[in-house]
Image (cartoon, rainbow, N blue to C red):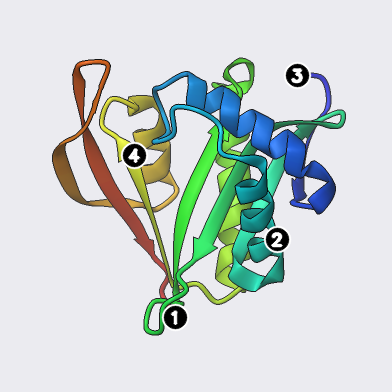
Amino acid sequence: MTNVRFIPTEEKYIDGFNATVATVARERRDIGLVEGPPIEGTRAFVRALLAGGGVQFLAVDGESVVGWCDIDRGQLEGFRHVGRLGMGLLPEYRGRGLGRRLAEMTITAAISAGMERIELEVFASNEPAIAPYRKLGFAVEGVKVKARKLDGIYDDNVFMARIISP
């Protein structure tokens, strides 16, 4: 970790973001994906964020994307005040406070964009993420027991949210 910067997303980083998601997905542990999404889907997602559908910050080392945090705004009438947080870091960048900083910046941007509720799902086995989410103001709203069965192992899905006071 030489020179990690935190920047708002840009189209020029779409390929790197896609590759980072794919790396985290192949770990088959912390996010719901088990392989990377198609690049066209990633392009559409980032372009929708840039068009006002949410916010995203990237952790960039040199010119390489090493992590992301995004909050995707609800699109349905009555749910546009809600954002859904997703994030990940490459393994060698974890445990250094980068995820917390990335999440703080993204949450601040989401609040500035008018989001009043930010929600997320985290696997119960991902204990290293749950405590930091609590420190960021997220509270557990429920648990979906045995929500995932991957490689013969069950995992619960913990639903958390942070309500932004007006």
Give coordinates of residue 30: x percent, y percent.
41, 28
Give coordinates of residue 114: x percent, y percent.
55, 77
Rendering quarter of residue 152: top left
Q: What residue is pinned by disc 4? A: 122
In three-dimensional space, the C-alpha distance between marks 3 and 1, rounded to whole angstroms, equals: 38 Å
In primary-sequence order, the first of circles 4 and 1 is 4
In three-dimensional space, the C-alpha distance between marks 4 and 1, rounded to whole angstroms, equals: 26 Å
For the residue marked with disc 1, what is the amino acid? Pro
Q: Is residue 103 visible?
A: yes
Q: Residue at x 70, y 61 (%)?
A: 47
Q: Secondary structure at mark 4?
A: strand
Q: Is residue 97 visible?
A: no
Residue 142 placement, left or right of 22: left
In three-dimensional space, the C-alpha distance between marks 1 and 2, rounded to whole angstroms, equals: 29 Å
In primary-sequence order, the first of circles 2 and 3 is 3
- The mark closer to the camera, 2 or 3, is 2
Mark 2 Cα-neighbour bin, 10 Å: few <14, some 14–19, many ≥20:
some
In primary-sequence order, the first of circles 3 and 1 is 3
Q: What residue is pinned by disc 3? A: 1
Q: Are marks 4 and 1 in contact (CB under 8 Å)?
A: no
Q: Residue at x 86, y 32 (%)?
A: 63
Q: Is residue 151 above or below residue 21?
A: above
Q: What residue is pinned by disc 2? A: 47
